[in-house]
Amino acid sequence: MAAVEGRELVFGLDIGTRSIVGTVGYRDGARFHIVAQREKEHETRAMLDGQIHDIGKVGATITEVKNLLEQDLGRKLTQVCIAAAGRVLRTVTASVEYTFGMEKEITSEDIYALETMGVEQAYEEFTRDNDTDMQFYCVGYSAMRYYLNGYPMGNLEGHKARTAGVDLIATFLPDDVVDGLYKAVGAAGLQVANLTLEPIAAIQVAIPEKFRMLNLALVDVGAGTSDISITREGAITAYGMIPIAGDSLTDILVQHCLVEFETAEQIKRKIGVEEIIEYSDILGLPQRITSQEALELLGENIRRMTGEVADCIRELNGDKSVSAVFVVGGGGMIPGYTQALAEQLGIAGERVAIRGQEVMQAISFDMENARRDSLMVTPIGICLSYYEQSNNFIFVGFNDQRIKLYDNGRLSVVEAAIAAGFPNENLFPRRGEAVEYTVDGKSRMVRGEQGEAAVITVNGQEADIHTRIQNGDKVVLTPSTAGEAAHPTLDKLPEMEEPVHITMCGVRITLPRLVYVNGTQQLGTYEIQNGDQISVQNWYTVEQVAQLADIPLQGRILVNDAPARSDTKVYEGFDVRFVPDDDEEASEEEYAWQGEGEDDPEEAYVEASYPEAVDFSPQRSPGDAAGAQQTPSEVELQVVVNRQPVTLRGKKEYVFVDVFDFYEFDLGNSRGRSIVTLLNGRPAQHFEALHQGDVINIFWQ
C-alpha cells in the first residue's frame, strides 16, 4: 500500500449490489484511522444478488470511486482489499496440528503457517467431498480454537510449545464470483491486496472478540444477499447466506408505485423517516404514499425474508436459536425488520439490534462529514481484514496462459503447473519403453533410456519445479522428454557370456551358447521383443558340432571315447571324435564302450587334454571393451592339394579344414564309401595346423 506520512494506507472496497463504498485508512496501535471515504451507486443494475453481471460497468463505477479518493488523498491508489458476498457459499471445518523439532517460542509467522496448513487441508477435503464441475476458491477463514501441546489456548503467540494446533472454518466460493471481482477491480487499474468474505469483514467491527464467547449471530443485509455468521465460545463457528435482501423490497415498490428502480429505492429509504413520501411515476404524474402504507405493502415480504434468515441461523447454530442478533447493512434498516427477525427466532425484540456507530469505538474518522451508520460496518471491516489475514489470489503467466492461484505464501512452479493442467508426467524425465520377456521361464525386463528433464524458466531465469513464484511472474516450462526405448539383443544376456568348451578330434574348441526364441533358433544379434520366451541351451548335439566345424558327419563318432550318434548331446568339457571307417590306427579296443553298465554315453565324462584351442564363439572386434588386442598381420600359406598349388589367405594360422575354403571339392556328391584326407601321406586331423609346402590329398574311397 502507499504510505502517507510514513504510514501504510489500506484501501478497502465494498462492491455491493446497489452501491460501491471505498474507504482508506491506517492502523495505529489498537485504533484504525479513516482518512478518506467515498460512495457511488450503480447507474444500472450491473449487479444482482451480490453477483457482478456487467464487469465493464462495475469497473467504471469502481474507477469513479478510486478517482475521487485519489483526489482526496492527493496520491495514486494501486492496491485494494475486497470482499465477496456469500453467494453459493460453501464452508469446511478443518483441524491441523504441527510438531516442531524441539520446544520453541511460537511466533506470528508460525501461527500464519499453521493456519495456512488448515486452509490447505480444508481445500483438500472440500474438493474430495464436492463432486462438481465448478472451480471453487477459498475466500476467507476464521480460527475457531488454538491448541498448545494439545490444550485449548486463546492466543499461541509468545508461548513455548512442541506442538501447535488449530481448528478453523474455511469458506469457498465459485470461480465466477471471484473472477468477476478481480476483473472488475482490474478494469479500474487496481491489484487485489487481500480478499475476504463480507460476513468475515463485518464481524471484525460488529462483534469484538470480547463478545464472541456468547452465542451470537451477525446478519449483514445488503441489497442482493443476506450474509450470516455465528459466534460461540470465543470463535466464529459458521457462515451462511440467503439470496434475498433489500432489493426484494424495492422490486415490490417498483410494481406498486409504477416507478423505475432508482425512484423505488428512494421511496424505501424514506419509509419511517417521512410520514408522507412524494414521488413521480413513470408517466410523470405526481404521487404520494405514506410510510404506514408502504410498510403494510412490504410487511409480508419482510416476514418472509426474516423467516429465511432465522431458518439459516438455526441451521448454522445446531438447530437452535442464538442469544442475540446484530444487524448491519442498509437492507436491515427498513422499519420492522429487527422486530420481525426477533419474532421468527423466538427471542426478545431488544435482542435483535442494528449495529452502527456504537460498535465503532476503536475507529477514528479523520475527515469531515464521515458516515458512521451500519452501512459502513462492512467497508471498515474489509480494511481491518487486511491486518488479520492475507487471503489473496495471484496471477502468473504459464506458457502463454494466465492462471489464478490462491496465495498461501509458499507458491512454487509446480503449483502453477498443476493449476494450468500441465501433465504431471511431463514434469519429470521419462524412460523409454521397456521390454519384458522370459529366460528359461523367469521374467526379465530391460528399461528404456532416461529422457531429458523439463526445462523451466521464471522471468527468463533458469529455475526448477520448486522455485518460488509471485504475482506477475512469467513461467515457461518445456516438457520433459522420453528416452530411447529398450533394444536388448540376445548376445547381451548374461547366460551368453559363458560359452561351451569341448575337445574335438584332440583340439579344444569354444562354442557359443545356442539360444531359442519362441521355439526358433536365433543368432546373438536378434533384438528381443515384448513377450518373447527365450531358452538358452548349454549343450550341442554331435550333428550341430559337425555342422559348425564344417565336418562331414561320416564314419564312427566317439563322445568321451564311447560310441555316439548324431543326436548325442555334448556338454561342457566333453570330448568328441570323428573316426573314418578305414582308420587303421584305431583298434577295436580303442572304440569299445568303456562305460559297461551305463545306458547313456553322454554321462561318460573323460578328462581331456587340450594341446591347442579353436574358438567358434563370436569374437570381439578390436574396438570392443575388456582389453582388445592388436589384430596380428595376415600371412599367406602355399600348399599342394591333389598335385595343384593352392594359396591360403586371410589368417595368421591355418588348420586342415581351411583348405576347403580355397580348393573346390564336392562333398555332397558321393563317389564312394568315404572321403580320404591325407596330409603329407598320413591321415589328416581336421584341426591340425598346416605349414608352408604341405602336401594334401583328398579323394573318395
Image: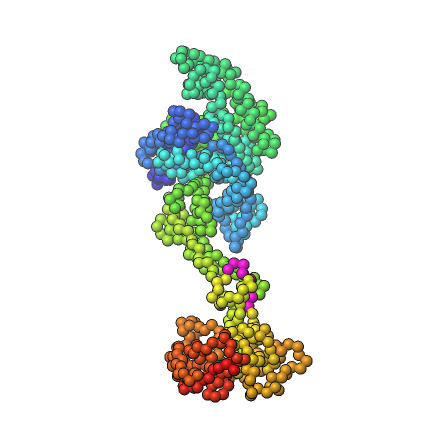
Comparing 331 with 676, the one in front is: 676
The image quadrant of residue 287 is top left
Q: Is residue 195 magenta?
A: no
Task: Provide residue 598's location: percent of width, then percent of height.
Answer: 66, 79
Q: Residue at x 37, y 31 (%)?
A: 56
Task: Provide residue 452's location: percent of width, then percent of height.
Answer: 42, 56
Q: Residue at x 40, y 50 (%)?
A: 477
Q: Is residue 531 magenta?
A: yes
Comparing 486 with 670, the one in front is: 670
Task: Provide residue 230's location: percent of width, then percent of height.
Answer: 54, 33
Q: Residue at x 54, y 25 (%)?
A: 306
Task: Provide residue 101's location: percent of width, then percent of height.
Answer: 52, 55
Q: Quadrant of the N terminus?
A: top left
Instruction: Give the residues in magenta.
Output: 529-536
Q: Can residue 10 be seen at all in this image of the molecule? A: no
- Relative placement, left or right, of 649 versus 144 is left
In the displayed structure, would residue 669 be above or below residue 365? below
In the displayed structure, would residue 25 be above or below residue 420? above
In the displayed structure, would residue 316 be above or below residue 465? above
- Relative placement, left or right, of 639 versus 531 is left
The image quadrant of residue 183 is top left
Comparing 105 with 560, the one in front is: 560
